[in-house]
Amino acid sequence: PTVLEAADARVAELLAAEQTRQHDTLSLIPSENHVSPAVLAATGSVLTNKYSEGYPSRRYYQGNLVIDGVERLAVERAQALFGVEHANVQPLSGAPANLAVYAAFLEPGDTVLGMSLDAGGHLTHGWGVSVTGRWFRAVRYGVRRETGVIDLDEVRELALRERPKLIWCGGTAIPRTIDFAGFAAIAEEVGAVLAADVAHIAGLIAGGAHPSPAGHADVIATTTHKTLRGPRGAMLMSGDKHARALDRAVFPGLQGGPHDHTTAAIAVALHEAAQPAFAEYARAIVANAVALADALIERGYDLVSGGTDNHLLLVDLTAQDVGGRAAAEALEQAALVCNYNTVPFDPRPPLDPSGIRLGTPAITTRGLTPDHMADLARWIDESVQAAGREDAAALQRIRGEVVELARAFPPPA
Ligand code: PLP
């Protein structure tokens, strides 16, 4: 038995079951990925035993010489990979990182302009159920109804009228390239701080498959566990000008001790992302997403914005007359794991919206190529149709085919 099996059979059993689930299904959730064994090893390391409040050479605990080396390495690698002067690798995850941006630049009641959740923004960009929408005065931009794409003229109009102190660009369900220079011009015109939340596309940026916000945004916020393929964590990056404000916002503003095992794993992931193979990976993610989009469109599916430039597609199922939730549940029966998602101007409620969100980072890590996307689109189409007529037998048949492919392309060991 493994150490874990001997110590705690119940947890060991649950972990084994989750490993089997990950092996035998395909994750189409655009914010998920399969990390390398090296990232996993660093995450599950003795660094979890250490307290290191503060920053390298300025700690509130003794015994941090090694940890300082780990954190400096992660910071240097982030600076090099993203071409930024400053990086803070301590935010515990994406939402806390974004909160630190507010803590660095805003006072309660100040105005923030962010993309609305139903158009593809993130909760932390000022949505009402988040403290960012309760403690700040949130104004929201969306997408144009006819195109499904952000309208920078609307953003500029809103910014001129509402005079936000902080503007967010980036989000969780944006299938198109973000015009960082366009946002930067607006932020400059109204004197706002521009924060680019590139959580979803950080790996594409690192691999050169999406333009970088470096040189445009005042702050770049990102998680490390999506396309970047690192551990669950986050980073804040900026020019030297904002370094102190961001560092102080993270610690002692919002957090206590950093998760040093995560920091080490971030360092490993950044090293991996700096290799030529990662640029190929980033390009392959986009090629797979475009191929999947084309194959779904050919089958009569309506994609928000008509397609994708990146790693994700937002499928509007209104024409299929199947709710997003029923579709996502049917797809799970067929071993295709995705999430239901609102589409812009969605007439349906958030818990059963009109769409599903699909992404290719995880299946690209497993080695699937554009040649596989016709089959994938067929399985998605057949599953959605089966959801419409509640055909469990059809879903079981599809599941058999999906599992066969999944087993032929296992995630990294
Ligand atoms: N920002 C964006 C754009 C995201 O998509 C997410 C995650 O869904 C977050 C922030 C929050 O990250 P976390 O879930 O790590 O708090």
Image (cartoon, rainbow, N blue to C red):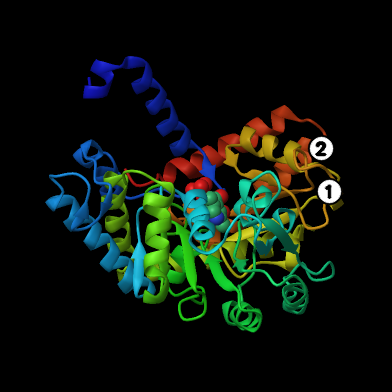
Quote the CA–CA distance across marks 1 and 2. Answer: 8 Å
Above or below 159: residue 70: above
Q: Position of residue 349 (x, y in %)?
A: 81, 42
Is residue 239 visible to the viewer in this orientation of the structure? Answer: no
Q: Position of residue 257 (x, y in %)?
A: 31, 44
Sooner in the amino-acid sequence: mark 1 or mark 2: 1
Q: Nearer the viewer, residue 273 or 137?
A: 137
Q: What residue is disc 1 on?
A: 320
Seen at 50% across and 44% down, the residue is 405
Amino acid at circle 2: Gly
Say which quarter of the image contains residue 282.
Answer: bottom left
**Quadrant where the image shows the N terminus:** top left
Badge 1: residue crowd in 10 Å (few <14, some 14–19, many ≥20): some
Q: What residue is disc 2 on?
A: 388
Is residue 82 visible to the viewer in this orientation of the structure? Answer: yes
Q: Position of residue 14 (x, y in %)?
A: 41, 23
**Quadrant where the image shows the C terminus:** top left
Seen at 76% across and 36% down, the residue is 387
What numbered label is drawn on residue 57?
none
